[in-house]
Every structure is written in structure tokens, then in C-alpha cells.
């Protein structure tokens, strides 16, 4: 096919055979968040480039290499959002929400974009859900948010033994300054062995070296200084609160000193929920997040308590129980006519069926009865409601129970036009 008529590399269509899984997962996500007191926020897919450069930070892979940016007709640099948090913070401050109410529990769902080499588990248009809590600095909130993530996984059918929660604390700006110096000193000792990216990162964003996937870099950083050894008294106490809160919510966690997140705005708590049943290979993180009190500084001039996480919908779909997301109770009707236009009774019956939650497909076309039955079979209709000339003249329908075998006596029968809906509702339960 002409390449102009293919989808852009790394951007997938979601076809009807799969879209119901997405719909059911999105429904489950929304319910999960709503029940925990979160409200949905929807921000535009496009933002000014500057938002992400300042919000995410230069020296990060996202800003340096992965953003989908272009100049619009007014000459403004525009970016397709690579993640959700910066936009949420922008929206909350732009609309003065914090002045109206100090505490917000927000969630979002939607497509994100990163211009990177498409490979397994990495798309240029991918989908994320995320949750943010603004206004509470207490470490117990960090535990609550992580629990929101683990309880979500359990709800989608992931077993407790199939995931692990990893946590760490980066400390505040002053803890981090000392840590950064010590880390750079350590990295410089083995600078020659680091990969090219990490040689660059040692200068631009040394913390990022800790999550390099290169085996040599990994073995070097195994012995690197740990952020937890550099925490001030307050940060250390905060991390203690996070750990007791997790215990209180019944969430098992382990400390991972290399969990530093590459984004500038994180402070104190960072966490990841990783799948360990091998379904996702090396891209096994389904939910990742942390505290980012200092992100607000660029927007409001001061810090504001904030913690959040984001999760990948594609990855969650891979690990979620397919039975949980499957279409439930498949029941539909094919309303088949050979007499062309409907009469008022027919239209009323179709309306009533649909109102009763029964999917009803109508075929008024001049195609043959045979073709229409074939279609009813293919879409797995439970009943065909047939209206031919005889039915029209006699004021009844012929009802065919397509779930029964050909020679069943109950398979086909007449029903009065005004008894149709009740009859189908009754038979639905059989
Ligand atoms: Zn500190
Ligand atoms: Zn490296």
C-alpha cells in the first residue's frame, strides 16, 4: 500500500476486536479512582514546548531526544504531551484551583507521545493513566497513593505474587546536592567504562546514570553511593512515615537505591510497581511515580506538596486478566425485515429493546434473507426478529432463537408484535 495511507510508525489503531478491552479497562480505572475520592482532569494533547522543557527538565531523555515538537503557523513551538503531570500542574495553577481548595486528588487517562525508535513495549503514541495528590506533604499520603496503585493491579486480576513495589527517597534539594557531588565523584572514577550516554549524563544529569540499562553501567552503579545515606533528619523521618504507611495499607515494599527517576522535579519518595511474572520482559514497570513538591515552583513561585504516579495502559492490558476485561453477557438481536420501511410498532419495539440494554442491529436493506441471517450468525446474535409480508399482514413477528440447534422445537415461533420485548427479556434469562 502507498505509505501515505499507512499509520505513522509506532502509532497503532485500536480495532473493534480489541477496543472493548480498552473500554472495560478505562471504565475500571475511572471507577477505581472515583471510589478513592479522585476526580478526572482532561488537559489538551498539545502544549507549548516550554512547559515540558521547564517541567521535565533539560538533560532528561524525554526533553533531549524524545519530544514530538513542531512549529505552528504562528511560529510557536508546540509539543505533543510526552507525559501528564506537567500539564496537570499547569492547569491547576492556571485556573487557581489551589486557592479555592488546598487539597486535590486528580486522575487522567489518555494518549501521550514520544518520538523514539519504535520497539516492543515502546510506541510513539502510547496511553497512560495517572493520579496526583496535591496539598498534603505527610508521608502517609505517599503510602496511600502507592496503595491506590497496588489495589488497582489486584482489581485488574494481577496476582499479588506477580508484582513488587520498589521504593526509595531522593531527599530534598539540600540532601540531593550532597548526594549528587558524591555520585559524580564516584562516576568519574569509572568514567572511561561508562556508555557514551552515561558519560554525557555524568555531566548533565548524573542521577540518570543509575537507571541506564547498559550491563556495564549497571554493574558499576551497583556499588554507587545510596541516596538514603544522604538524607537530612526531616527527609529521613519522612521516608520512615512512608514505610509505616505502606505497612498500614498492607503493601509489601522493598528499597531499591537505584530508583531515582530521571526527571528533575522529583524530591523525596520515588516508587515503581514492577511485574515479575515475565509477561513484560525488561519493560516491566507498570506504574511509576514520586513526590515532586518543587515542580510548582516554576508556576507559583513556591513549593507545593505534590505526589503522583503514571501507568501504561498498553502494559496494563498485557498483564490484566482477560476474563475481567472481556465483554460480559453477550446478547444481541438482529431485527430483519424484508418489507422495507418499518411501521411505528417496529420502531417502538426497537427503541424499547435498546432502552432495556439489549443491543439491537437493524437491517432494512433489500439484501436477501439468507444474507441477513449470515450476518446475524457472524455477529453472534442471540435472536433474529423477522418481519416479512406474512408477519406484516398478521401483526406478529417470527422469532428465531439462534442459540438453539436447528432441530429444536423451540427454535422458531410466532410472537404478537406488542409482546416482543417481554418475550425477549424473559428468554434472555434462559
Ligand atoms: Zn532533606
Ligand atoms: Zn550507561
Image (spheres, rainbow, N blue to C red):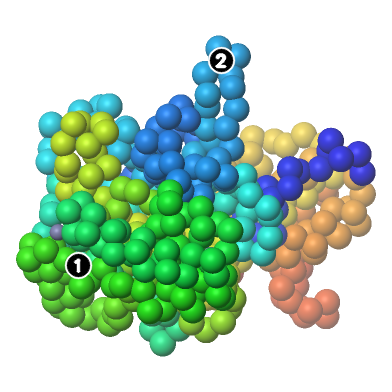
* Coordinates of residue 34 in the picture (x, y in percent): 29, 54
Circle 2: is it few (<14), some (14-19), or many (20+) Cα within 10 Å? few
In the shown orientation, is residue 72 left or right of residue 128?
Answer: right
In the foreground, 200 or 139: 200
Tell me the residue that label 2 is attached to.
75
SS under mark 2: loop
Q: Which residue is mark 1?
A: 230
Of residue 18 and residue 284, the one placed in the foreground of this image is 284
Residue 216 quadrant: bottom right
Q: Residue at x 29, y 78 (%)?
A: 255
Q: Residue furthest top?
A: 74
The residue that appears at 13% across and 31% down in the rendered structure is 99
Image coordinates of residue 404 in percent, x first then y, are 74, 76
Asked if the beta carbon under badge 1 is closer than 8 A to the nearest atom of ligand 1, the reply is: no
Foreground: 122 or 381? 122
> How many C-alpha atoms fall within 10 Å of the one at disc 1: few (<14), some, or many (≥20)?
many
Picture quarter with the N terminus: top right
CA distance for labels 1 and 2: 45 Å
Residue appearing at x 78%, y 59% in the figure: 376
Residue 295 image point, x, y percent: 27, 42
- Above or below, 136 relative to 99: below
Q: Nearer the viewer, mark 1 or mark 2?
A: 1
Instruction: Place residue 43 in its image quadrant.
Output: top left
Nearer-the-camera pick, 332 or 61: 61
Would you place residue 90 above or below residue 34 in this image?
Answer: above
First in residue order: circle 1 vs circle 2 = 2
Q: Is residue 307 left or right of residue 337?
A: left
Quick one: SS at disc 1?
Answer: helix
Amino acid at each position: 500500500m502507498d505509505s501515505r495511507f499507512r499509520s505513522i510508525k509506532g502509532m497503532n489503531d485500536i480495532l473493534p476486536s480489541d477496543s472493548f478491552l480498552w473500554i472495560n479497562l478505562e471504565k475500571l480505572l475511572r471507577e477505581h479512582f472515583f471510589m478513592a475520592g479522585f476526580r478526572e482532569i482532561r488537559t489538551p494533547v498539545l502544549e507549548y514546548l516550554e512547559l515540558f522543557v521547564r517541567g521535565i527538565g533539560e538533560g532528561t531523555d524525554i526533553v533531549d531526544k524524545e519530544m514530538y515538537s513542531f512549529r505552528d503557523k504562528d511560529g510557536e513551538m508546540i509539543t505533543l504531551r510526552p507525559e501528564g503531570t506537567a500539564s496537570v500542574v499547569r492547569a491547576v495553577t492556571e485556573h487557581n484551583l489551589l486557592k479555592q481548595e488546598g487539597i486535590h486528588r486528580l486522575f487522567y487517562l489518555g494518549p501521550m507521545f514520544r518520538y523514539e525508535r519504535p520497539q516492543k513495549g515502546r510506541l510513539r503514541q502510547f496511553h497512560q493513566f495517572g493520579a496526583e495528590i496535591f496539598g498534603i506533604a505527610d508521608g502517609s499520603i505517599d503510602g496511600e497513593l502507592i496503595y491506590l496503585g497496588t489495589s488497582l493491579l489486584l482489581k485488574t486480576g494481577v496476582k499479588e505474587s506477580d508484582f513488587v513495589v520498589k521504593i526509595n527517597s531522593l531527599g530534598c534539594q539540600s540532601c540531593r546536592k550532597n548526594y549528587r557531588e558524591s555520585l559524580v565523584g564516584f562516576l568519574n572514577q569509572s568514567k572511561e567504562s561508562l556508555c557514551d550516554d552515561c558519560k554525557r549524563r555524568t555531566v548533565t544529569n548524573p542521577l540518570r546514570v543509575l537507571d541506564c540499562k547498559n550491563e556495564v553501567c549497571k554493574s558499576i552503579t551497583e556499588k554507587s553511593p545510596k541516596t538514603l545515606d544522604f538524607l537530612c533528619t526531616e527527609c529521613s523521618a519522612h521516608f520512615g512515615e512512608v514505610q509505616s504507611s505502606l505497612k498500614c495499607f498492607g503493601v509489601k515494599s522493598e528499597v531499591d537505591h537505584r530508583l531515582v527517576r530521571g526527571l528533575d522535579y522529583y524530591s523525596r519518595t520515588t516508587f515503581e510497581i514492577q511485574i515479575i511474572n515475565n509477561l513484560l520482559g525488561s519493560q516491566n514497570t507498570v506504574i511509576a511515580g514520586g513526590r515532586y513538591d518543587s515542580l510548582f515552583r516554576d508556576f507559583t513561585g513556591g513549593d507545593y506538596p505534590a505526589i503522583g504516579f503514571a501507568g501504561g495502559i498498553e502494559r496494563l492490558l498485557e498483564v490484566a486478566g482477560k476474563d475481567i476485561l472481556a465483554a460480559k453477557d453477550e446478547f444481541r438481536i438482529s431485527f430483519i425485515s424484508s418489507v422495507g420501511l418499518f411501521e411505528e410498532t417496529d420502531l417502538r419495539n426497537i427503541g424499547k429493546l435498546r432502552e432495556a440494554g439489549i443491543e439491537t442491529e437493524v437491517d432494512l436493506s433489500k439484501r436477501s434473507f439468507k444474507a441477513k441471517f449470515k450476518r446475524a450468525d457472524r455477529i453472534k446474535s442471540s435472536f433474529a426478529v423477522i418481519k416479512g409480508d406474512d408477519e406484516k399482514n398478521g401483526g406478529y413477528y417470527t422469532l428465531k432463537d439462534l442459540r438453539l440447534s436447528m432441530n429444536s422445537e423451540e427454535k422458531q415461533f410466532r410472537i404478537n408484535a406488542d409482546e416482543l420485548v417481554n418475550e425477549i427479556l424473559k428468554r434472555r434469562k434462559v
